[in-house]
Image (cartoon, rainbow, N blue to C red):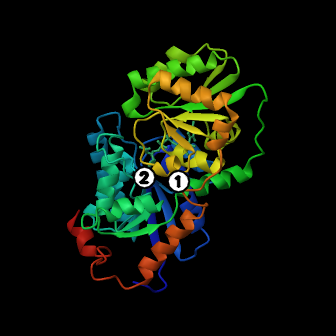
């Protein structure tokens, strides 16, 4: 499979976090003359996706036709998969890359598998070990990992999860770090040094997880009001565009003088806000990876996390969505400098910012070597592509 022909990679991505986490791969691929990397945007997130990619000077080379995706996740998955397959048939990449656990990633993997194209999974092996939480992301990860030929595990813990599924997971696993750290460090290097007010501690709050919508987010907002009532904090809360989230947050937090509600922040702005924050309260996944690298304590507003690495380094604490527990834990970090310092030591469990380089090295290695017997190259066969039409 070696030779001088360029390796054609197509990344199928659709949401803001996928844009952020695939950008380092696109940037690292650009100087490699024998790799042709292109981005196919599914449209799962419209403007948020484009803005996040644009913060890295990138834009998608290909887009799916606009699809109705305000229906059920299953219908959205089917529509994406069908439209992605049509693009794969015309583009005929050597490998399809998907990132993480979104509906776009799942649909991309299904489409590639159906056409016999090898799949590279960026951020493989994350497991909460609860198929219902986060939903559908845990299901998506498990399924994508079963279909993937190359699995790029961000940490050795993620690799261990995949090894435990050996026989069901049949691809080649490489520990690479998380490309989200590549993105974060590149963006932070472009920003001015953070400034913070001596008498007003900044708390960054964001929440949007599906399993928190309803009573979970209501309790989080209750906790945020009580913290804001202290008088010595400012809470910055970028509100996710999902109206089911925004309606609750705006109804409960608008008007409080110490709480600023904004629309979703540009990636560069959220990196600046994280770096300036005294404390971060989130249910997002990516920020659990980013904040340890910045040395900012995080209270995770979930009952389980698939990122135990940040718990082990002491940068994260799981507090769930009980308002009293959130207030007590946050107040301790605000009032006790030693408790804060214990969670504020920068740590890099998700890599030092070279994940994209490792991913591309592993891909080059795969295409330059003879396929091992137990990993027959399932691609490049026009017959498979044709039969699948
Ligand atoms: C279940 C789960 O955990 N799945 C995750 C999910 O990602 P998530 O939960 O981390 O998603 P979000 O919170 O939407 O995005 C976070 C990113 O957005 C930036 N940000 C945030 C607020 C803002 O106002 N402006 C911004 O720019 C922020 O710094 C960060 O980089 O999907 C990914 C893709 O597959 C997976 O990798 C990942 O496992």
Q: Can you tell me whether the CB of the residue at mark 2 lies under 8 Å from the nearest atom of ligand 1?
A: yes
Is 325 situated left or right of 65 in this image? right
- Residue 358 position, x and y percent, is 53, 69
Placement of the C terminus among the 4 image quadrants: bottom left
Q: Mark 1 and ligand 1: say if the CB distance to the nearest ligand atom is below 8 Å.
A: yes
Element at label 2 = loop
Name the residue located 55 percent from the left edge and 33 percent from the top edge.
281
Q: Which residue is mark 1?
A: 21
Q: Label 1 vs label 2: CA separation? A: 9 Å
| Residue 121 in view here | no
Q: Is residue 161 left or right of residue 184?
A: left
Query: Relative to residue 158, is residue 130 depicted above or below?
Result: above
178 or 69, which is in the foreground? 178
Q: Quadrant of residue 120?
A: bottom left
Q: How many marks?
A: 2
- From the top left corner, tell me how far across and down residue 247 is, in percent: 46, 20
Viewer-side residue, 298 vs 362? 298
Label drawn at residue 177: none
Q: Quadrant of residue 44?
A: top left
Query: Residue at 78% of width from left, 30% of height from top?
Result: 197
Numbered disc 1: secondary structure = helix
Residue under pointer 2: 100
Q: Residue furthest left?
A: 387
């Amino acid at each position: 499979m070696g030779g001088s022909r360029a390796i054609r990679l197509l990344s199928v991505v659709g949401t803001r976090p996928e844009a952020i986490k695939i950008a380092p791969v696109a940037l690292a691929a650009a100087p490699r003359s024998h790799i042709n990397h292109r981005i196919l945007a599914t449209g799962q997130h419209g403007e948020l996706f484009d803005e996040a990619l644009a913060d890295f000077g990138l834009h998608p080379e290909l887009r799916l036709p606009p699809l109705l995706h305000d229906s059920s996740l299953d219908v959205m998955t089917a529509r994406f998969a069908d439209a992605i397959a049509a693009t794969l048939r015309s583009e005929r990449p050597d490998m399809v890359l998907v990132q993480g656990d979104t509906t776009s990633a799942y649909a991309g993997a299904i489409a590639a598998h159906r056409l016999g194209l090898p799949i590279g999974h960026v951020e493989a092996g994350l497991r909460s070990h609860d198929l219902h939480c986060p939903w559908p992301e845990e299901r998506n990860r498990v399924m994508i990992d079963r279909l993937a030929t190359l699995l790029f595990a961000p940490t050795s813990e993620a690799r261990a999860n995949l090894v435990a599924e050996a026989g069901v997971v049949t691809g080649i696993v490489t520990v690479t770090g998380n490309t989200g750290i590549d993105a974060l460090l590149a963006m932070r290097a472009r920003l001015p040094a953070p400034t913070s007010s001596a008498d007003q501690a900044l708390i960054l709050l964001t929440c949007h997880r599906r399993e928190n919508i309803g009573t979970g987010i209501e309790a989080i907002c209750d906790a945020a009001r009580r913290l804001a009532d202290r008088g010595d904090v400012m809470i910055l809360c970028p509100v996710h565009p999902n109206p089911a989230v925004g309606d609750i947050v705006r109804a409960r937090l608008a008007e409080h003088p110490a709480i600023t509600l904004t629309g979703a922040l540009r990636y560069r702005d959220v990196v600046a806000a994280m770096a300036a924050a005294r404390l971060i309260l989130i249910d997002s996944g990516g920020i659990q990876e980013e904040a340890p690298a910045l040395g900012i304590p995080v209270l995770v507003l979930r009952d389980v996390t698939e990122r135990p690495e940040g718990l082990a380094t002491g940068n994260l604490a799981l507090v769930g969505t009980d308002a009293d527990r959130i207030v007590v834990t946050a107040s301790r970090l605000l009032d006790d400098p030693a408790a804060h310092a214990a969670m504020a030591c920068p740590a890099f469990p998700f890599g030092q910012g070279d994940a994209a380089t490792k991913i591309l090295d592993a891909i080059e290695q795969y295409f330059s070597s003879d396929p091992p017997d137990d990993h027959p190259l399932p691609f490049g066969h026009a017959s498979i592509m044709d039969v699948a039409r």
